[in-house]
């Protein structure tokens, strides 16, 4: 996906071409939104029928609806471009599967190995609706970078380098939103209890030098800069990834958290714990989750009641070289089959507004 960043699209395409193991297995389709001449020329310099690099061009920049404020216009354009491009890919070009990337992303050396190995898992488990290369809580200080092969299920749609099927797009296209498409994907009535697979260590990273402020106005730039690509590539084709199938994953997760040392949020924040993990930290409210997240560097925003990377409300991270699980109090840890319940039961959409209130309070209501 490209629009106005000529240097970014050149850098991104250089990486895709360098890293892909096969032009036949991984043909590249570049979609440009708008008429930026420098971007058009950059893309044209890469297109090649022999190398299976195709250019599609979304020129239809009609008048924007009058009800949009200035901050919403970019989100409207992005959503419109995504719909047009994916309709082209799946309905016109008839691809059965696609990996979506954006021009400001850098790619890990094992990017294609990751997606190729996870394709059978996506097709085998109907509870998985996408594969993402991104870990929202992927800061180097809270991830196990010695084990970059670890993968997880998450209820929270990550995006930022993700794979979907034509079957899923056939479902999504007809109801695609006017803007904020990624938050729409996180809605419980859209997600329908399905999950994405995400890595411990992100296989994409933001190239902040080339990205500019982006649609968020640079809001997350400092945090995104902390999420780095892995130092060591993994050959995912050699790994048994069947543990990601829901029944296998839920069984393992239940064993892991059942044997963990249980802490309250206050215990964790006061550091009144010792020994070896895993540790389990319970949280009851958005305020408690926020206190916990701020103390270690988790992303704090809540969407459709879900913390980023959550699975059944469980958010895992590394701290002081130990594995921690932040777990909602309402999750019954003594129930061996919690995964049989709808994961949406563990999310309260009122937490979205409550979290925004806490953000406002922290920003504007601090004592002087």
Image (cartoon, helix red, strand yellow):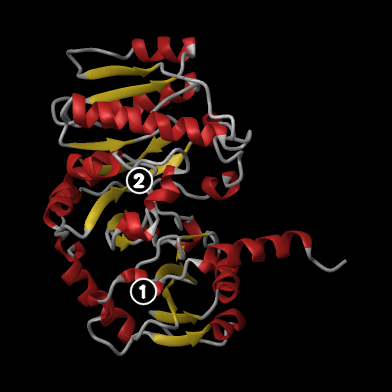
- Residue 350 in picture, x, y percent from top left: 52, 68
Query: Is residue 256 found left or right of 135 in the rendered image?
Result: left
Question: Regarding mark 2 in the picture, which secondary structure is present there?
Answer: loop
- Residue 294 in picture, x, y percent from top left: 60, 66
Query: Is residue 199 found left or right of 270 in the rendered image?
Result: left
| Nearer the observer, 254 or 166 | 166
Using the numbered discs, state the Cα–Cα distance from disc 2 to disc 1 in whole angstroms: 30 Å
| Nearer the observer, 39 or 279 | 39
Q: Residue at x 21, y 60 (%)?
A: 127
Question: Regarding mark 1 in the picture, which secondary structure is present there?
Answer: helix
Which labelled disc corresponds to residue 173? none
Q: Residue at x 24, y 52 (%)?
A: 129
Asked if the residue at tag 1 contacts the one at tag 2, i.e. Cβ–Cβ closer than 8 Å, the answer is: no
Q: Residues within 10 Å of mark 2 (few under 14, many from 20)?
A: many
- Residue 187 in picture, x, y percent from top left: 39, 56
The residue beneath circle 2 is 203
Which quadrant is the C terminus positioned in?
bottom right
The residue beneath circle 1 is 345
Residue positioned most to the bottom: 334
Q: Is residue 137 above or below residue 225?
A: below
Q: Residue at x 48, y 66 (%)?
A: 349
Residue positioned most to the front: 66
Residue positioned most to the right: 368
| Nearer the observer, 193 or 256 | 193
Q: Is residue 348 above or below residue 96?
A: below
Which quadrant is the N terminus positioned in?
top left
Q: Is residue 274 visible?
A: no
Q: Is residue 50 above or below residue 77?
A: above
Comparing labels 2 and 1, the label whose residue is closer to the camera: 1
| Nearer the observer, 72 or 267 | 72
Q: Residues within 10 Å of mark 1 (few under 14, many from 20)?
A: few
């Amino acid at each position: 996906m490209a629009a106005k960043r000529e240097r970014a699209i050149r850098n991104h395409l250089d990486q895709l071409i360098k890293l892909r193991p096969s032009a036949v297995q991984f043909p590249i389709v570049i979609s440009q939104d708008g008429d930026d001449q420098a971007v058009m020329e950059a893309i044209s310099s890469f297109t090649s029928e022999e190398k299976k690099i195709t250019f599609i061009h979304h020129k239809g920049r009609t008048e924007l609806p009058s009800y949009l404020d200035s901050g919403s216009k970019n989100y409207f354009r992005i959503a419109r471009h995504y719909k047009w491009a994916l309709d082209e890919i799946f309905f016109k070009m008839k691809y059965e599967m696609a990996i979506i990337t954006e021009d400001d992303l850098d790619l890990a050396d094992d990017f294609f190995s990751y997606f190729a190995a996870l394709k059978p898992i996506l097709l085998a488990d109907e509870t998985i609706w996408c594969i993402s290369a991104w870990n929202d809580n992927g800061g180097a200080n809270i991830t196990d970078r010695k084990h970059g092969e670890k993968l997880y299920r998450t209820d929270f749609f990550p995006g930022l380098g993700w794979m979907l099927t034509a079957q899923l797009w056939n479902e999504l296209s007809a109801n695609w939103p006017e803007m904020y498409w990624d938050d729409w994907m996180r809605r419980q009535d859209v997600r329908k209890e399905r999950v994405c697979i995400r890595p411990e260590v992100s296989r994409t990273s933001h190239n902040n030098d080339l990205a500019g402020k982006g649609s968020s106005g640079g809001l997350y730039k400092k945090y995104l800069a902390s999420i780095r690509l892995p130092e060591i590539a993994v050959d995912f084709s050699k790994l048994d990834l069947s543990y990601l199938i829901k029944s296998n994953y839920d069984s393992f997760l239940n064993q892991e958290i059942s044997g963990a040392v249980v802490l309250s949020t206050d215990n964790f924040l006061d550091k009144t714990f010792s020994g070896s993990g895993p540790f389990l930290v319970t949280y009851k409210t958005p305020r408690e989750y926020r206190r916990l997240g701020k103390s270690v560097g988790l992303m704090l925003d809540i969407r459709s009641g879900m913390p980023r990377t959550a699975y059944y409300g469980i958010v895992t991270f590394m701290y002081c070289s130990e594995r921690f699980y932040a777990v909602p109090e309402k999750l019954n840890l003594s129930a061996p089959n919690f995964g049989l319940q709808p994961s949406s039961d563990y999310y309260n959409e009122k937490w979205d507004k409550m979290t925004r209130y806490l953000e406002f309070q922290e920003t504007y209501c601090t004592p002087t």
